[in-house]
Image (spheres, rainbow, N blue to C red):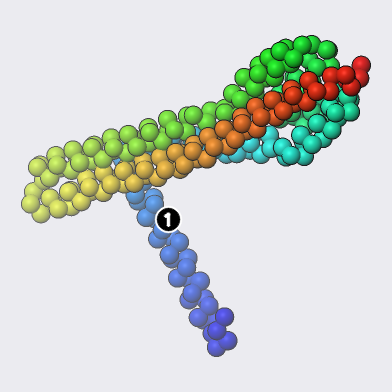
């Protein structure tokens, strides 16, 4: 901070910052109003997309589990033959990975054949992965719809602009044309913004989902091999 600055200078700077924030807010409000009714469609799509993004983010956080720590603990219990303790450990950390591992441990504890242990874990993967995916695929759908809605608003704005210009007197033609173009460009901009947020989030979530599925499948295969090698140590 400048040591020679006066309280008046600080007050002036604060006032200018407040005016800039108000100008930005007024610009967004004006752009939304100028976009016409299509902007409300885009806004609705954006709200739903943000809701899905927040919901999936919270769900992924709740399902997060340290794979290395979990598998180290489980494999140590399997090697010692204490499958009941391993199942209790899975229950203490509910997640797609732990639920799938438990499904295999239940069959191994019941002395079922290796094929049934594998089938139980495969069936668990099929149950768990839809829970991980949730409504993530709709983010891609909403991204495409937002682009199409923006295009629709653009076309409506241009049609209205040309109609207004054709019916207006020479003094107001320029104003009518600028209003129609503003309508079109605002819809395009907001539609692309919603689409960008939706599609980027969809890509990130798909990466997380694929990573989770790979970890579950890899761990289930390792567990089956470990159970096969240590069946004689399983305690009743």
> Which residue is tagged 1?
25
Position of residue 198 relative to residue 217, above or below, is: below
Q: Looking at the rendering, in which quadrant would you find the N terminus?
A: bottom right
- Residue at screen point 84% across, 27% down: 78
- Say which quarter of the image contains residue 100: top right
* Front in this rendered view, residue 61 or 129: 129
Q: Secondary structure at mark 1?
A: helix
Classify 10 Å Cα crowding around label 1: few (below 14), some (14-19), many (20 and above): few
Residue 47 placed where, x, y %?
A: 48, 38
Q: Residue furthest front?
A: 229
Q: Is residue 112 above or below residue 10?
A: above
Measured as percent of width and height from the top left, residue 82 is found at: 89, 25
- Residue 52 horizontal/vertical position (percent): 54, 34
Give me the residue at 34% from left, 37% from top: 147
Between 16 and 84, the one nearer to me in the picture: 84
Report the residue that reaches farthest toward the right.
236
Which of the two residues, 132 or 42, is positioned nearer the viewer here? 132
User: Residue at coordinates 49% horizontally, 38% vertically from top-left?
Assistant: 203
State the quadrant of the C terminus: top right
- Residue at x-position 65% and y-position 27%: 217
| 185 vs 125, nearest the viewer | 125
Locate residue 131 relative to residue 140 in the image: left or right: right
Q: Is residue 85 left or right of residue 174?
A: right
Report the number of numbered marks.
Answer: 1
Q: Is residue 120 visible?
A: no
Q: Is residue 100 visible?
A: yes
Q: Is residue 101 left or right of residue 148?
A: right
Q: Position of residue 120 (x, y in %)?
A: 71, 15
Q: Is residue 112 left or right of residue 186?
A: right
- The answer to whether residue 24 is above or below residue 81 is below
């Amino acid at each position: 901070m400048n040591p020679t600055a006066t309280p008046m200078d600080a007050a002036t700077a604060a006032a200018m910052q407040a005016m800039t924030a108000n100008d930005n807010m007024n610009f967004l409000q004006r752009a939304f109003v100028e976009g016409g009714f299509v902007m409300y469609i885009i806004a609705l799509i954006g709200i739903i997309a943000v809701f899905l993004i927040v919901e999936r983010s919270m769900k992924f956080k709740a399902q997060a589990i340290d794979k290395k720590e979990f598998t180290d603990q489980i494999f140590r219990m399997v090697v010692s033959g204490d499958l009941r303790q391993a199942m209790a450990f899975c229950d203490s950390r509910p997640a797609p990975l732990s639920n799938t591992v438990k499904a295999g441990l239940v069959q191994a504890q019941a002395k079922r054949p290796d094929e049934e242990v594998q089938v139980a874990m495969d069936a668990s993967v099929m149950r768990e992965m839809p829970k991980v995916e949730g409504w993530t695929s709709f983010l891609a759908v909403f991204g495409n719809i937002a682009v199409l809605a923006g295009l629709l608003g653009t076309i409506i704005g241009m049609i209205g602009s040309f109609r207004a210009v054709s019916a207006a007197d020479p003094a107001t033609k320029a104003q009518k044309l600028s209003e129609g173009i503003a309508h079109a460009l605002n819809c395009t901009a907001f539609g692309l913004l919603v689409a960008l947020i939706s599609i980027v989030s969809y890509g990130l979530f798909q990466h997380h989902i694929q990573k989770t599925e790979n970890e579950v499948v890899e761990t289930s295969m390792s567990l089956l091999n470990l159970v096969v090698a240590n069946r004689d140590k399983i305690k009743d």
